[in-house]
Amino acid sequence: MKTRIFTIIAAISLILLSGCEKGRFLSSINGAPYELLVVADKSMWNTTCGKELFGLLEKDMPSMPQKEPYFSTSKCDPSDFNSMLKPTRNILIVDINAKKYKRTAIAFSQNKWAKPQSVAKIVAPTADSLQSLIERRGQEILNYFVQAELNREKDFIYKQSNAQLENMVYEQFNIQIKVPTEITKYKKDASINALWLSSGATEARTDLIIYSYPYTDKAQLTLDSLMARRDSVCRKLIPGPVDGSYMGTETKYDFPIKKDINKNGKYCAQITGLWRVYGKSMMGGPYISHTSIDQLHQRIVTVEGFVYAPQKNKRNLIRRMEAVLQTVKMPEYADDITVTANK
């Protein structure tokens, strides 16, 4: 009996310790994904620098079929920043004080009042200096909170994923990826070495496309070339609901955006854009793709996530797909490649 009691006490202790940071017990974060609390003096909210700040955080995401902001923000005065608000998942603190600060600065921290929490603090001597800082480093602030949400999503996916489909992907493409548990359906096309994975949901569907082809030169990594390959694969792999209809890239109302990024320290071409079904259908939505070089096998590998959620917000869904793309591990990465986008 004593042994059993000791075991129970030890288990409880481990649970409590798992929520501790530097000897403190940390509660779980509050709020929904992509919600952000700005703690700033009320007198600043409607000033030029205040509007600049909130305009940055609430600006529309690119490559979306309808307007959706990067973050859903709320605000409070420092005097109202109490124990109920401190566990908020994302917090941006702004302090303007000429007596305390001689220059502007940004400090980023994790798990200050809760876990897993992301906090940024901006200090500035004047409103003008704050505005200048936002203009210079605003994207850095935005990226910090976006990546924090992507990391939370990845942590969740790593804990719960579809091992069967992950093994299927590895056997076909020799790459590792974490597939969310809601994605259970698949379709293969050996003739184009492509695989389509889908949740099959009718209201908020999430899908992945993976395909590879031989790598010959950098010209294959321009936006035009990558779009042409995508449309070729999708037309054959993903039919529309009406005979003769097929999935393709939307270019009339919004053109895809290509960004050259580093992924695991190596080159990756990221494209965000809209897809649509051609041929008597109104289906469409956002997509994001990562294209990398597999130097070991001299091939190009593209992994794409796309969303179909008619009459629903899609920000969190497409961000979930972006998190999935960040879990991809190639067998070997190419040396650094510099590619100039032609669009």
Image: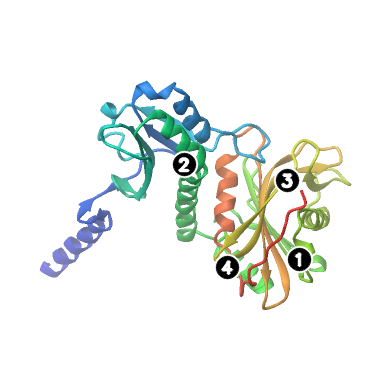
- Residue type, label 4: Lys
Q: Which disc, if any, is residue 329?
A: 4
Measured in 3D between alpha carbons, the distance from the residue under mark 1 to the one under mark 4, in whole angstroms, is 21 Å
Q: With 218 as the anchor, is 17 left or right in this view?
A: left
Is 80 above or below relative to 225? Answer: above
Neighbor class of circle 2 (other Cα within 10 Å; few <14, some 14-19, many 20+) is some
Q: Which numbered disc, 1 or 4, marks the residue closer to the eye? A: 1
Residue identifier under label 2? 33
Residue identifier under label 1? 218
Q: Which disc, if any, is residue 256?
A: 3
Label 1 element class: helix
Identify the mark nearer the N-term, 1 or 2.
2
Q: Which numbered disc, 3 or 4, marks the residue closer to the eye? A: 3
- Residue type, label 1: Lys
Q: Which numbered disc, 1 or 2, marks the residue closer to the eye? A: 1
As rendered, which of 14 and 23 lies closer to the eye?
23
- Labelled pair 1, 4 in contact (Cβ < 8 Å): no
Identify the mark nearer the N-term, 1 or 4.
1
Neighbor class of circle 4 (other Cα within 10 Å; few <14, some 14-19, many 20+) is some
- Residue 20 position, x and y percent, is 24, 54
Measured in 3D between alpha carbons, the distance from the residue under mark 2 to the one under mark 3, in whole angstroms, is 25 Å
Identify the mark nearer the N-term, 4 or 2.
2
Is 317 above or below relative to 129? Answer: below
Neighbor class of circle 1 (other Cα within 10 Å; few <14, some 14-19, many 20+) is few
- Residue 246 position, x and y percent, is 83, 48
Q: Residue furthest left?
A: 2
Label 3 element class: loop
Q: Residue at x 54, y 54 (%)?
A: 323
Identify the mark nearer the N-term, 3 or 4.
3
